[in-house]
Amino acid sequence: MTACFYGDDFSRGPRAFREALERLRVFSSFIVAQRITGINDVWQTTWDGAIEFSYNNTNGAINWATPGPISSADIVIDDEQLFQQMDGFGAAMTDSAALVLTNLKNANSTSYWSLLQYMFNSTDGADGAGLSYIRLPMGSTDLSATAYTYNDACCDTSLSQFSIDVTPSYVFSVLNDIKSVNNILKLHMIPWSPPAWMKDSGTLFSGSLSSAHINTLAHYLFKCVQAWGAKGFTAYAIGIQNEPQNVNPTYPTAIVTADQEAQVAMALRALLDKNGFSGVKIIGGETNWDSSEYAGTVLSEANSAISGSAWHCYAGDSSSQSAVTDTYPTKEIYFTECAGIIGSDRWTDIKWQTSNLWIGAVNNWARAALMWSLVANSDGSPVLPSTDTCRGGCRGVVSVSGASWSVNQEFLGMAQANKAILPKDPGGPWGQRIGVSVGGSLDWALVVSAFKTARLNSADWNRYSMVVLNWDDSSSTSWNPQSVSTTIEFRGYQAMYSFPVGVTTLWWFAPN
């Protein structure tokens, strides 16, 4: 194909000149197409609920061309800037979540399997979120029917009576069902309390870990990994203690100091490595964003044992994650808990969660970002009878009512983000965060993260993706949601797209 210009094109008047420019545009698009595909795949959720995690094939309508003037917003992608590899998005499989799912399965098996497919099917091109990271409590939480650990027999320091079979059987059943849908599922295990006899309080509710049981707790955690593995559930990562600075007399909690956590981690690492579990990551922290000193102490004192730190959303902001990464650049970051509350505004939640979690935490180095409980009844039940938490109703990522289910705002933003990072090839790598910046007069209106997903065959083109939040709704003044006309810059080329208020995920392909 040749772009033809004739000597008199510019002397024959405006029409001839426009025709010449059009030939140049077509020629330029042809050349770009040899280097980058158009942006054909769009997933979208809009602020008003008119579109919810919906796919649209643009059929080449969003093309790359030679750059022109920038629009009101200008997104610049730099795929030479490489950051963390992603591990996925998800939530916790609490006892309550497994019970609610089991009740749904009994009430309407078709609806149950439809929900699992929609949440967990990670096959490329599937009409589902492909959630692939599950936080798995080891023992009870505030969302359990009863309070228990895996070894409640007092003073059994040999752990001879240890058993994970005290876990409700429906937890194992539901996890097996999810595994049948998603074979790349990662499990991040974490206890809410050591057994009561390992604590100075002698109770699961509140109290502190006794220093006399540092090694006992390390063996207990090792046996957790071993026992779950024997049932076919391989641990991807394990934590020492959920919210180790939180003590509450109404549900299982424990104070574990940073020094103690570091000691447990060192002993646990030795046990895992010695017994064939060297690939299991130990993740410290599980504290709020405002507790970076805790994570820093654990990473310093157990540097050789700890793979990274985990964070919750209830105080501070995600910039703390980057501050820890600046000090410990080889250590990983995981964002592992934030709870939605029943009755809050849908769009306000999507904005906050996307800007702070699905994009914000990720842009501050998180390899995974998770909500609290995966599923709950529509009123947030069931909860531990004694607990004073979630009494206003902790909303699940999905709500179930009788024989039907519905996704909540937590699902929508999370699903949008997860679509950007799923492996393109079966068994292939997850997305890796790459450089992105926003300019233009409306640079404040867009919050963006960008990713590159490599291929198993180096000859195949990589997938590139963006997750874009447009929060230009003028909610602080007069409500007036505005689409943002945007230029997108990539490898010296430019595309145009108008982002509606909401969350948009875009895909395209290009060679290495």
Image (cartoon, rainbow, N blue to C red):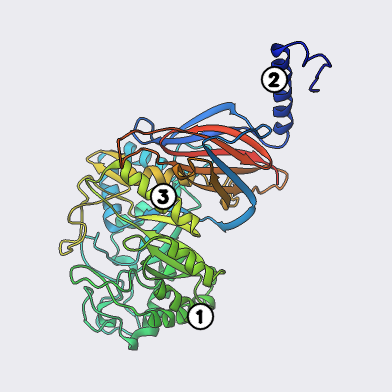
Crowdedness of circle 3 by 10 Å Cα count: few (<14), some, many (20+)? many
The amino acid sitting under disc 2 is: Glu
Q: Earlier in the sequence, mark 2 or mark 3?
A: 2
**Where does residue 353 sit, x and y in percent of width and height?**
37, 50
Q: Residue at x 24, y 62 (%)?
A: 142
**In the current view of this chain or complex, which residue is farthest to the left?**
386
Against 51, residue 120 (above or below) is below
Task: Say which label, 1 or 2, has the lower sequence index.
Answer: 2
**CA–CA distance in space, label 1 to label 2:** 67 Å
Instruction: State left or right for residue 64 relative to residue 242.
Output: right
Q: Is residue 200 left or right of residue 92?
A: left
Residue under the point 55% across and 40% down: 74
**Secondary element at tag 2:** helix
- Residue reaching furthest to the bottom: 212
Labelled disc at residue 22 = 2
Which one is in front, 472 or 279?
472
Is residue 28 shown left or right of residue 206? right
Is 409 left or right of 183, judged from the image as shown?
left
Disc 1 crowd rating (10 Å Cα; few below 14, some 14-19, many 20+) is some
Specify the amino acid type for callout 1. Answer: Ala
Instruction: State the residue at coordinates (30%, 63%).
Output: 167
Outermost residue, right direction?
7
Figure quadrant of the N terminus: top right
- The residue carrying mark 3 is 355
